[in-house]
């Protein structure tokens, strides 16, 4: 059984891999793990804010990001935005950007 401490270590490994491989503007923990006390330590939802130039390198950025969770035994769903879209959509209800900006948790922010 995975504990909260083990789950946190796996999540940190995934974020480290994202930062190393994609140089994102930010990585947000969204979904119930981002705004409540989780009871499932096997799944995370992450919004990754990437530059347009980085996105242009991938036909399916979410698929490329999914590789960052390989070997962690943690199921991860990846959502992608750009800095411009995030700024525009974070105030638009029913978008992942809004969920991240209003209830999510920043796991990484460039320059911080």
Image (spheres, helix red, strand yellow):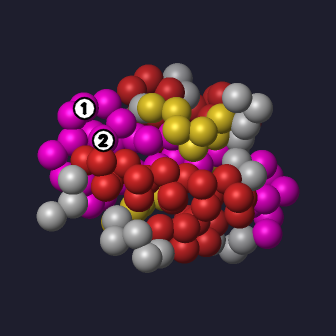
What residue range appears in magenta? 28-57
Q: From the viewer's perspective, is 1 left or right of 53?
A: left
Q: Position of residue 69 (x, y in %)?
A: 47, 68
Rendered-image quadrant of the N terminus: bottom left
| Residue 40: in magenta span | yes
Q: Nearer the viewer, residue 35 or 96?
A: 35
**Can you identify the residue that label 2 sits on?**
33
Residue under the image location 51 percent in, 59 percent down: 14
Q: Position of residue 21 (x, y in %)?
A: 71, 63
Residue under the image location 65 percent in, 35 percent down: 109
Residue under the image location 61 percent in, 61 percent down: 17
Instruction: Count residues near mark 2 (Cα–Cα under 10 Å), then give few for <14, some for 14-19, many for 20+.
Output: some
Q: Position of residue 7 (x, y in %)?
A: 32, 54
Q: Which mark is residue 36?
A: 1
Q: Which mark is residue 82?
A: none
Q: Position of residue 8 (x, y in %)?
A: 37, 48
Q: Among all residues in the image, which is located at the extreme right?
A: 53
Task: Relative to 107, say whether 44 is above or below.
Answer: below
Q: Quadrant of residue 67?
A: bottom right
Q: From the viewer's perspective, is 45 left or right of 87?
A: left
Is there CB contact under 8 Å for labels 2 and 1? yes
**Is there any visible trace of residue 98 in the rendered image?**
no
Residue under the image location 45 percent in, 32 percent down: 105
Q: From the viewer's perspective, is 97 left or right of 17?
A: left
Element marked by disc 2: helix
Q: CA distance from mark 2 to mark 1?
A: 6 Å
Q: Quadrant of residue 36?
A: top left
Element marked by disc 1: loop
């Amino acid at each position: 059984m995975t504990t909260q401490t083990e789950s946190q270590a796996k999540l940190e490994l995934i974020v480290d891999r994202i930062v190393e491989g994609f140089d994102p503007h930010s990585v947000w923990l969204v979904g119930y793990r981002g705004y409540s006390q989780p009871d499932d330590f096997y799944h995370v939802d992450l919004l990754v804010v990437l530059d347009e130039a980085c996105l242009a390198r991938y036909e399916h950025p979410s698929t490329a990001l999914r590789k960052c969770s390989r070997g962690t035994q943690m199921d991860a769903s990846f959502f992608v935005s750009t800095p411009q879209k995030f700024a525009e959509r974070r105030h638009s209800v029913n978008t992942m950007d809004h969920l991240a900006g209003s209830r999510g948790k920043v796991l990484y922010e460039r320059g911080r």
